[in-house]
């Protein structure tokens, strides 16, 4: 697995090709916006049927990231389930899978805007978490403190051979680091959007996910 090391607020971190983040010093693995159960939620609310494979795919990639990094702590940065009912209606197979991934690790569920934390599962449920003065939360704030968040599902578009290449990406500047959505079927928001352009400084960079993660200036 190609892992891209980078420095954020003086801290060495690593971006995984799948959009997970690893903090080797503390053996912390961070993922955001799993949105487990999204196909079930869409079917329940709109009647639109999507292939119900996204939870299996998301958990499989999460397991790969855990196997690659062997973390002692996993932080899920909110919207771990597409809504509360999606969390309650996971299949027994998927519930057992999540339980197995959590076993023997400190597991922190950060509250998101889609879910207040999957209380039926174990682990620790928090609005935010701080490690070495870096705050982990779901949505980026206006605070000046260093923070790692998710929520926006950022994507970057860069020109390549006469066409635009679009990939989920990390965005980071002097104090903010925003993770891409880890879940399948999650979509994304272009880094050139007013929301993201307004949040990030002019020095911000993007780390494109994929087989070979790479750093580029944040596309605006």
Image: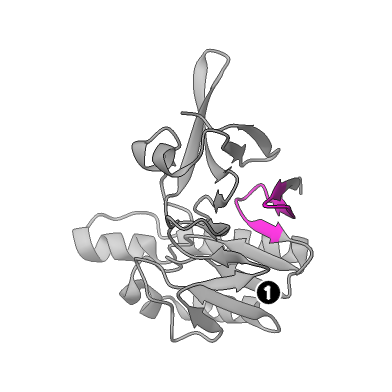
- Considering every residue shown, the one lying at the far right of the view is 25
Q: Say which quarter of the image contains residue 20.
A: bottom right
Residue at 51% x, 56% y is: 144
| Tag count | 1
**Relative to 211, does residue 92 appear above or below in the rendering?**
below
The location of residue 72, given as percent across then percent down, is: 73, 75
Is residue 8 part of the magenta span, yes or no? yes
The location of residue 110, given as percent across then percent down, is: 49, 72
Residue at 40% x, 67% y is: 112
Q: In the image, 67: left or right of 182?
A: right
Residue at 21% x, 63% y is: 45
Q: Nearer the viewer, residue 99 or 6?
A: 6
The location of residue 31, given as percent across then percent down, is: 57, 61
Q: In the image, 125: left or right of 206?
A: left
**Relative to 51, does residue 88 appear above or below in the rendering?**
below
- Considering every residue shown, the one lying at the far left of the view is 46
Q: In the image, 213: left or right of 70?
A: left
Name the residue carrying label 1.
73
In magenta, the rendered stretch is 7-22
Is residue 72 part of the magenta span, yes or no? no
The location of residue 77, given as percent across then percent down, is: 51, 65
Q: In the image, 86: left or right of 94?
A: left
Secondary structure beneath label 1: strand
Q: Say which quarter of the image contains residue 203.
A: top right
Q: Say which quarter of the image contains residue 105.
A: bottom right
């Amino acid at each position: 697995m190609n892992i891209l090391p980078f420095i954020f607020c003086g801290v060495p971190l690593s971006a995984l090709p799948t959009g997970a983040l690893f903090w080797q010093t503390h053996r912390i693995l961070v993922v955001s916006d799993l949105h487990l159960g999204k196909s079930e939620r869409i079917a329940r609310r709109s009647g639109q049927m999507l292939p119900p494979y996204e939870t299996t795919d998301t958990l499989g990639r999460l397991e790969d990231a855990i196997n690659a990094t062997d973390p002692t702590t996993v932080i899920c940065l909110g919207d771990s389930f597409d809504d509360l009912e999606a969390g309650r209606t996971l299949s027994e197979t998927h519930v057992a899978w999540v339980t197995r991934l959590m076993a023997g690790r400190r597991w922190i569920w950060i509250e998101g805007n889609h879910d207040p934390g999957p209380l039926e599962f174990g682990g620790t449920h928090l609005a935010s978490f701080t490690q070495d003065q870096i705050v982990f939360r779901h949505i980026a704030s206006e605070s000046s403190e260093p923070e790692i968040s998710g929520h926006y599902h950022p994507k970057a578009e860069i020109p390549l051979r006469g066409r635009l290449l679009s990939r989920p990406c990390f965005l980071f500047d002097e104090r903010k680091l925003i993770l891409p959505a880890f879940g399948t079927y999650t979509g994304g928001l272009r880094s050139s959007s007013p929301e993201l352009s307004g949040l990030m400084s002019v020095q911000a960079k993007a780390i494109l996910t994929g087989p070979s993660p790479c750093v580029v200036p944040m596309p605006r």
